[in-house]
Image: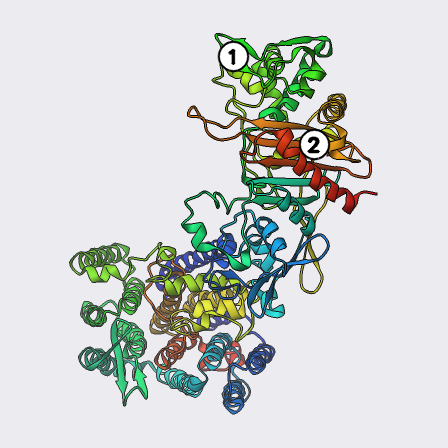
Amino acid sequence: MKTLSRRAWILYALAALFVAGLGILFYTFWSNADDWAMRHANRHLYAGDTLTAAGSITDETGAVLAETVDGDRQYNDDRDVRTATLHVVGDSEGYIATGVQTAYQEELTGYNFVDGVYDVKRYGKGNDLQLSVNADLCVTAYDALGDEKGTVGIFNYETGQLVCVVSKPAFDIANKPTENINNDTTGEYEGVYMNRFFSGLYTPGSTFKIITAASAIDNISDIDDQRFRCTGSYGIDGGSVKCLGTHGTIGFERALNVSCNSAFAQIALQVGTENLTATTNALGFNQRYTLGNIRLAQSRFDLSEASQLDLGWAGVGQYTTLVNPCHMLMIVGAIANDGQAVMPYLVERITTQNGDTVLEAETTLGAQMFSESTAARLQELLRSNVENYYGDRRFRGLEMCGKTGTAEVSSEEGGDDPHAWFVGYSQREDLPYAIVVVVENGGGGSSTAIPVANEVMQAVDDLYGE
Amino acid sequence: MATKKKKATHARRYRKPVKWPFWLLLMTLFQLSCMLQIYINGTQESMVTLFTVYGVYIAAEWIYFFVFGIILRRKSFEIELIAFFLTGIGLTLTTSVYPDRAYTQLVAVLMGMIVFIVMLWVLSDTKRVIKLRTPVAILALAALGITLIIGDEINGARNWIVIGDGALSIQPSEIVKVAFVFVGAATLEHLQSTRSLTKYILFAGACIGMLFLMKDFGTALIFFFTFIVIAFLRSGDIKTIFLVCTAALLGGLGILTFRPYVANRFQTYRHVWEYSNGGGYQQVRLLIYSVSGGLFGLGIGNGRLRSVYAATEDLAFGMVCEEFGIIIAFTVLLTFVALVVYSIRYSVAARSTFYSIAALAASSLLLFQAALHVFGVTDLLPWTGVTLPFISRGGSSMMCCWGLVAFIKAIDVRTYRRYDKIERS
């Protein structure tokens, strides 16, 4: 009998093996739960490919943008609202990756490992999500873009609340033109599933001069006393950086007003590769930002293989530099906010069906992008741009500060019109909003982007201004 | 004097028995809450059926405990509590998913309890065991042989005998499990005799071979495992066991090489998500719905896994996860560990080696089968489609499980004698 009980140790080993297996199984469950539960085969949450278990999605004012009625996903009654908010709301099939219906699908269903899909069972749907955006403002911005592709984003640079995010082209989700999108040969629906504001990357053009200027203020002590000569281009090492005008001899501030490429190429050469790279790094280039569950496309700035001529081009926002519109908005917001960046947010609040708050947006500070004195000087310069060059009459009553950009994107063979940019903010105390406008192949920043920016900012003033 | 001292030590080895009335009451409440959930969710249309099934089952529990606990004044009831707990969960799943099969399952449970009591009586006398040994072995081989000849193929394995147009279907391989442990432990009474060992090896080989021919690889594996456990406990010869395992492994590889269709059955292993609408359909649903239940479950009748093919049999673990919650599901699995640990601890104080080997073999068989079920269906091991003991629907397997726990129950002297008498003697 004793021999036998000694032999029984092997069964202890087997039992231990089994318990270890259970441990692995539990870990497998725990670590994969979110992924598995969100599979479209999960009939608790999906009908076909539609996420029916999601709660309602509302805008800042509480207007319903999407909700589940009798197991069917329904969207806002107004076609314009549906189209303008397509990219922030997202689709239920997951084509629009940064839409909250995809990026926040777990939160919308209320799924978690502890309770499973119990809330969906109990209430028939998951959590409600309130967006920070104003749907009417989005419609205004979408219409302001006219027939062009592009994006408009506006946020409160003190709190981080994104009040307007639109991306064009979009479509009416209630009448999705699937056939047209799949057989698109004209480019009408090019990148229709991409939210250009979060996922787009554009050549910054002259908007980058803000950054070159910041680097100059930090690194060149006599920058305000210097004079630059513009003859329509500036030659470097046998090549040249071309300017859109012939500006003669001008100072630093004027050079930014008129967006003189010759002057900024010279400034870039003075600042040098190292300092300019340091400035862009401080501003978050080559860095991955996430706003809640939404990942921004990563802005790129790389001078590691740049010649002096390339450095000159980089100083005016060309070369290989690419900027994400939301990132650019953060940078301009930081200038307005005395150098302190504030992270934008898109989701105001997530609540369960019995009213418990799962998530509530709060102001999150980002990096101190500029020193206070540099930010103050940039504020003066950006104000000067509008006051002395674009004209306050183009932004009636807004006291705007900003910079346009005309980003050359044509290849060697030529062809495409440049991207039109405007970035800026109102300096009014009661209107702490910053805006970014990108009109793809829209032409000049001043002629195309400023009217869009003005139209939307006027609407912002009507909504939030005193 | 010396014997007295020895007995006293043995008596001390028995832990204080658990207070069964408390646990019985708790379990009854649990089962009543299951009934209530089925009632509320309306998955069982016929209220008469619902109340009858639970009424009879709970009454059967209380009668059992009344007879054995109060009239016969037995004290130790851990094994029965576990068996009743697990059976109750299985009965709940069947009643809520297949209302029209609830009575069948209830009858199977009652028959299982009868098998349990009869087995305990049979096992009480080792002389009787020895006498029955050869007939049981012959009957077992006959049952498998007949299945092989007249059996019907269901889900790719020819291991069913269907009588009268599906009115009654029996899985003889389940019943033979009990016989397999019985014969394996009983041949040991002539300790270490080569002749009895050879006979057992022939018996085991024949059983496993026939299961292979039926293409019931899961059960064949369980038999093989049990054979190894019994052989090791008898001989203590790890080298021989190692040799046998290697030979079996080579044989298995040989089969996979020469019979590729066997390998095809395992082609989705570790790739179920790629075959989520093909060979991995059931497993993918099981994984999705298991985590959907959360730790506490969605409640009986609220699951979605139940609509997947053969959910109450092949996917029983997932159904428990989704509707009872992951905590209860893992508790269920840990009770199989408890049975093994119980057997090991009591094997020291058993009346003879027969009881020890039988209990150890039976409990490790149940544990191994649970492991094959759980780890197979969750894709951690290749999926053989074996059922989860006590939980999965099926009459033959229910009787088999109760028959097997009888071996575990029999290891404890208190099964046959009163606890206070053991202590006094």
Vertical placement of residue A285 versus B33, above or below: above
Q: Nearer the viewer, residue B268 or A27?
A: B268
Q: Which residue is mark 2?
A: A424
Q: Chain of mark 1?
A: A
Q: Earlier in the sequence, mark 2 or mark 1?
A: 1
* Labels 2, 1: front one: 1
Residue topped by disc 1: A240
Circle 1 — which element? Answer: strand
Reply above or below: A183 against B115: above
Q: Decide if residue B273 is on the left or right side of residue B245.
A: right
Q: Residue at x 26, y 66 (%)?
A: B217
Q: Confirm whether residue B338 shows in the render.
A: no
Residue A188: % across, % down: 48, 44
Q: Is residue B268 above or below residue B82?
A: above
Would you place residue B341 above or below residue A154 in this image? below
Quadrant of the image occupied by residue B263: bottom left
Instruction: Identify the secondary structure beneath mark 2.
Output: strand
The residue type indicated by label 2 comes to Gly
Q: Horizontal and vertical percent for residue B33?
A: 59, 79
Residue B358 seen by the camera = yes
Q: Position of residue A50 (x, y in %)?
A: 51, 61
Q: Are marks 2 and 1 on the same chain?
A: yes
